[in-house]
Image: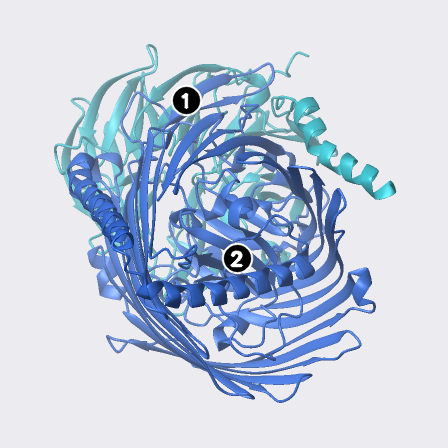
Chain colours: A cyan, B blue
């Protein structure tokens, strides 16, 4: 008889589970504050910084983190709880973040839109649809967004890229301008907008030009031939524009080019300066590189500083305490404009949470914290983030 | 466009229907004229077949306690005294299999313990199977005795295999412990065997005809026809055609408590396929023969991840995939002497795949074509030395090729790989009267890769891998047995792992798995009582996966490569319980599965950096593997009525990237109901089945951002003449 009873009970389990088992709804994902550096006192007018985590393609895991210099608290994932009504949070692959006026702008690449938030509350203001949008630049009353996907009719086989002009007052697209293939970073020098064209989707026919747009009539004036697969742009204080090339991962290595913006000619090629990402602080151009070759299936990482006045490499490793060995894939770089502390992010295997490391100006690690997936884009803010009212 | 294709296919089906009825008419005419000569012959054959069937059924009842009459014919057992499977597999067969609401083989596999099905949402989406967390590329998939391989990416999309005409599904951990098999049967860490229906004829029948029409949610229309014909005493033929079309559209909902709530429609999930199979079967006293041709053609949309989109613009997923799979396979088993039998099997497969990302939906358009070919030949030699001892020597030769046409870049760097694989297996089995059975096997694998274009390929591989299986039944009458196995095996890096342009890495090593399993099984029938029987088993296991091949990014999101990095340890338990009751005319059978799996990722690079504030994911549960999962099936039969309830539970899991809150995925569980009735009008049977799936309309995902359908319906009409 005992067997019978247990048999019946087993039969009942699924029914009970099915009838009673009304699954609770998923709550809004809460933010996760971590105290990482309560010991430092604040210097300068920088209140904190935002980190935009890209999230791997197709995972819908773009997320926003915030570090508060006044408390030393790093808070992961602040967007969701401040904007619970925004469907599927930030979306798929965050690609750039910038502050302009009182607004925080984020480019969400694979969700095809630009998110505009209030910088102090991180409350959603609006979103602006731009197909396959990549990077941001600002001047006067306009925002500029580079996008891979220009109009289909121009080149149906491989879409040429464009730059979209957005009025920051009305938050509407007012104009667009065709550039090269798969445009990446932009820089504004005087009244000219420079756009690095990569052509990364057209291998082996990479684009190799920097488009120059006249901001007065918003039309491309000409293209400057530079090198294949261009990515980053960084102007220095002397009218020069530094351009990074990713190479082709086979025979052409990554390097750095210099354009003289007075003549708009590529004047210099720094062959021995592979460049994945760079940022300028004073005359110091911080550059890291993760150079990969399909020929050897191996990659090399380097961290260099170039003096933009002398054009000499000051150091080949700005991380001086050996902790660079713990960084698998450097993916984001920022230098505190006042203290010159610098931040390096580690994207690891791209699918796990990344790490952000803070280094003192002399290159010694101060603190580290876990971020979202693929921490990549950092922006410092001079306006404090208002805590969320409970 | 579909309708034009449908226009070609439908007439074919109509012709089949007509020819079928013509044949029936002819047969009736023969009966009327008193032409009886072949009947005697067929009587003899059917007796033989019946004997074999009943043999097998009684085996099965003993082996696994299956009480509903199993109308399954397995591969025919030729060698008389050979030692049978030492450890029985998990099986689903016959009516039990057909009454589970399944769109494809992948759905039916949810009812096996230790098995995880990955379903990329939607009717057309990719479906793969993972056994005991070893990884889907470690699961060998066999169709009618011969492995289906995919040298390109190592996984078989089980969404492409229809349940129509499928008769038996069995899953083996380690390997099939039947000694008389090809070397490839020893060569995977786990194996799924799909066996399609083999013709059999009731009484003096010479033809069997079956037509099915199925329709339901997602604008489904599924038509199939089967014709089986007896050719003289020893031979029979079978032809089976199926056509399916579905829009794959369904609503899904994402919501957060106190937050957003959105309902969207799954788009670009349509599927259309045509499947045709034909077979010639021969069965002589000491010889068994089969020749089979398989054709599959499909066109489908890949629905993609339902991530956040701005619908103001047009970059929506429009990826399309076309497949064409053809294979011809044959096997011959012959008992040459009392102590010696051999089996020869051969296969040729030719597969074509086309993947398109149209220019209007993406900035990186793609139109890639892939052609794969496989030639396979195997010879197995069984020596049954005496009642206790048998040995098997088998040798397989396999040749694979992959050709492709894609972008300029792709073509310039694509090496056109070819692979020669030679496998040799030596195995020996003992089975003593006091209840101890054991099998030991050693497999040798040689792999040689070539490039048609003379480009550099991976070095040759020479690998030796052993397996040991032991089973002990102390008291035969008690129905209790203890079993254990150890197996070490590897999977070769696939062509994509090694040579895919801008991804592959020629320096990859094989990915090794080790498995240790102990278990206890109980199977008993109580004839004549209402508690008709009980089958139960508990297995606990420890597996490791070493040198796991994983994709790793290099300098940006577009540039990845493959590395031997991962190390995974899996500790798990599988529990199966299948009681069977009989109350007069009402038969009740149930099957409950529970799986516990602690699958931990101990990949070296995930090791803690040792910094405060940094979360370590070292030792975290492997993505998409639930700690707890299970299923339950309850079938009630009463005369020609059949009712089936099935329940699948998958516990909480984490998506890729460590066990942190953002990666958490809720548990899901679905309940499916089906009711069927068979109407008999003289010799004709009309079956009607109505199914309601996911009756509580649970919104769930198997893979994050790949939403699954809510409540859906299906009705099937089946006519057997």
On screen, residue A263 versus residue B174, left or right, reads left
Q: Nearer the viewer, mark 2 or mark 1?
A: 1
Q: Nearer the viewer, residue A180 or B101?
A: B101
Image vertical order of residue A68 relative to residue B78, above or below: above
Say which of A89 and B641 sits in front. Answer: B641
Q: Which mark is residue B264?
A: 1
Q: Is residue A379 left or right of residue B361?
A: right
Q: Point out residue A330 in the picture as x, y percentages from the top left corner.
A: 51, 50
Report the residue marked by disc 2. A317
Q: In this view of the protein, can residue B396 be seen by the observer?
A: yes
Output the chain of dot 2: A
**For this rendering, which residue is in front, B345 or A131?**
B345
Q: Position of residue A93 (x, y in %)?
A: 43, 36
Q: Please say if B468 is above or below A340.
A: below
Label 2: few (<14), some (14–19) or many (≥20) C-alpha neighbours in 10 Å: some
Percent x, y of residue B708: 48, 32
Above or below: residue B282 compared with residue A344: below
Where residue B17 sits, quadrant-wise, is top left
């Amino acid at each position: 008889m005992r067997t019978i009873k247990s048999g019946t009970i087993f039969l009942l389990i699924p029914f009970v589970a099915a009838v009673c088992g009304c699954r609770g709804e998923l709550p809004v994902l809460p933010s996760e504050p971590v105290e990482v550096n309560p010991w430092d006192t604040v210097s300068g007018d920088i209140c904190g910084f935002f980190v935009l985590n890209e999230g791997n393609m197709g995972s819908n895991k773009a997320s926003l983190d915030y570090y508060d210099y006044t408390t030393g608290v790093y808070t992961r994932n602040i967007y969701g709880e401040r904007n619970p009504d925004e469907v599927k949070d930030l979306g798929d692959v965050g690609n750039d973040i910038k502050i302009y006026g009182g607004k925080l702008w984020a480019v969400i690449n694979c969700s095809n839109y630009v998110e505009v938030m209030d910088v102090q509350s991180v409350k959603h203001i609006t979103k602006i649809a731009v197909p396959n949008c990549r990077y941001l630049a600002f001047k006067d009353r306009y925002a500029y967004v580079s996008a891979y996907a220009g109009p289909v009719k121009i080149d149906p086989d491989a879409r040429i890229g464009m730059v979209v002009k957005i009025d920051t007052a009305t938050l509407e697209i007012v104009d667009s301008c065709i550039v090269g293939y798969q445009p990446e970073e932009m820089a504004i020098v005087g009244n000219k907008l420079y756009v690095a064209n990569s052509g990364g989707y057209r291998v082996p026919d990479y684009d190799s030009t920097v488009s120059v747009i006249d901001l007065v009539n918003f039309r491309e004036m000409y293209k400057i031939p530079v090198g294949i697969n261009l990515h980053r742009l960084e102007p220095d204080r002397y009218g020069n524009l530094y351009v990074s090339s990713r190479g082709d991962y086979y025979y052409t290595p990554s390097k750095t080019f210099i354009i003289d913006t007075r003549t708009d000619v590529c004047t210099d090629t720094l062959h021995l300066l592979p460049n994945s990402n760079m940022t300028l602080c004073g005359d110091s151009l911080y550059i890291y590189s993760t150079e990969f070759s399909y020929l050897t299936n191996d990659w090399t990482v380097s961290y260099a500083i170039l003096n933009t006045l002398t054009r000499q490499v000051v150091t080949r490793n700005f991380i001086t305490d050996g902790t660079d060995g713990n960084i698998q894939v450097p993916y984001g770089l920022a230098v505190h404009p006042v203290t010159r502390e610098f931040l390096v992010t580690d994207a690891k295997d791209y699918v796990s949470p990344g790490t952000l490391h803070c280094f003192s100006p002399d290159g010694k690690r101060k603190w580290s914290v876990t971020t979202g997936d693929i921490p990549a884009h950092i922006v410092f803010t001079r306006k404090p983030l208002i805590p969320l009212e409970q | 466009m579909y309708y034009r294709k449908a226009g070609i296919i439908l007439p074919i089906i109509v012709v089949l229907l007509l020819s079928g009825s013509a044949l029936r008419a002819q047969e009736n005419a023969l009966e009327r004229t008193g032409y009886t000569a072949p009947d005697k012959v067929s009587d003899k054959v059917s007796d033989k077949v019946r004997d074999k069937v009943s043999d097998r059924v009684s085996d099965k009842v003993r082996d696994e306690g299956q009480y509903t009459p199993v109308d399954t014919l397995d591969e025919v057992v030729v060698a008389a005294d050979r030692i049978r499977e030492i450890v029985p597999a998990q099986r689903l067969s016959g009516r039990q299999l057909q009454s589970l609401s399944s769109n494809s083989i992948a759905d039916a596999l949810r009812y096996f313990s230790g098995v995880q099905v990955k379903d990329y949402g939607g009717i057309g989406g990719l479906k793969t199977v993972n056994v005991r967390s070893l990884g889907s590329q470690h699961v060998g998939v066999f169709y009618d005795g011969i492995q289906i391989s995919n040298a390109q990416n190592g996984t078989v999309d089980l969404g492409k295999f229809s349940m129509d005409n499928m008769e038996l599904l069995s899953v083996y951990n380690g390997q099939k412990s039947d000694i008389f098999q090809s070397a490839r049967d020893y060569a995977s860490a786990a194996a799924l065997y799909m066996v399609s229906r083999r013709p059999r004829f009731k009484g003096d029948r010479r033809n069997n005809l079956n037509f099915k029409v199925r329709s339901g949610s997602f604008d489904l229309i599924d038509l199939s026809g089967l014709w089986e014909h007896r050719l003289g005493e020893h031979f029979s033929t079978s032809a089976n055609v199926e056509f399916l079309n579905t829009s794959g559209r369904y609503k899904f909902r994402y919501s957060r408590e106190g937050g957003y709530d959105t309902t969207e429609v799954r788009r670009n999930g349509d599927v259309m396929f045509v499947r045709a199979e034909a077979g010639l079967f021969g069965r002589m006293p000491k010889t068994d023969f089969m020749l089979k041709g398989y054709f599959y053609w499909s066109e489908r949309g890949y629905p993609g991840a339902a991530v956040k989109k701005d619908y103001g613009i047009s970059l929506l997923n429009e990826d399309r995939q076309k497949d064409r799979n053809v294979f011809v396979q044959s096997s011959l088993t012959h008992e040459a002497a009392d102590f010696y039998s051999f089996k020869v099997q051969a296969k040729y497969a030719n597969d074509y795949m086309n993947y398109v990302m149209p220019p209007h939906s993406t900035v990186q358009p793609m139109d890639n074509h892939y052609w794969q070919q496989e030639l396979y030949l195997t010879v197995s030699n069984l020596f049954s030395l005496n009642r206790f001892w048998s040995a098997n020597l088998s040798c397989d030769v396999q040749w694979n090729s992959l050709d492709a046409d894609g972008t300029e870049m792709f073509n310039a760097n694509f090496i056109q790989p070819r692979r020669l694989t030679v496998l040799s297996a030596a195995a020996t089995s003992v089975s003593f009267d006091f209840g101890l059975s054991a099998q030991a096997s050693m497999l040798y694998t040689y792999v040689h890769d070539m490039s048609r274009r003379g480009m550099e390929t991976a070095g040759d591989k020479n690998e030796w891998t052993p397996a040991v299986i032991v089973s002990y039944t102390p008291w035969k009458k008690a129905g209790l047995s203890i079993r254990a196995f150890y197996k070490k095996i590897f999977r070769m890096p696939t062509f994509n792992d090694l040579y895919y342009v801008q991804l592959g890495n020629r320096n990859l090593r094989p990915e090794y798995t080790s498995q240790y399993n102990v278990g206890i099984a109980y199977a008993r029938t109580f004839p004549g009582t209402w508690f008709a029987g009980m089958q139960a088993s508990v297995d606990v296991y420890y597996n490791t996966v070493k040198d796991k091949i994983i994709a790793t990014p290099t300098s940006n999101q577009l540039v990845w490569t493959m590395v031997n990095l991962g190390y995974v340890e899996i500790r798990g338990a599988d529990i199966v319980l299948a009681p069977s009751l009989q109350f007069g005319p009402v038969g009740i059978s149930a099957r409950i599965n529970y799986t516990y799996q602690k699958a931990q990722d101990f990949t070296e690079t995930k090791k803690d950096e040792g910094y405060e504030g940094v979360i370590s994911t070292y030792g975290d549960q492997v993505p998409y593997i639930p700690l707890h999962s299970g299923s339950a099936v309850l079938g009630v039969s009463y005369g020609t009525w059949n009712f089936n309830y099935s329940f699948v539970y998958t516990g909480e899991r984490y998506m890729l990237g460590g066990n942190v809150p953002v990666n958490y995925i809720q548990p899901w569980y679905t309940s499916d109901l089906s009711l069927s009735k068979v109407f008999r009008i003289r010799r004709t049977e009309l079956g009607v089945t109505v199914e309601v799936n996911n009756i509580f309309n649970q919104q769930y995902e198997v893979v994050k951002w790949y939403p699954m359908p809510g409540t859906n319906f299906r009705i099937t009409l089946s006519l057997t003449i």
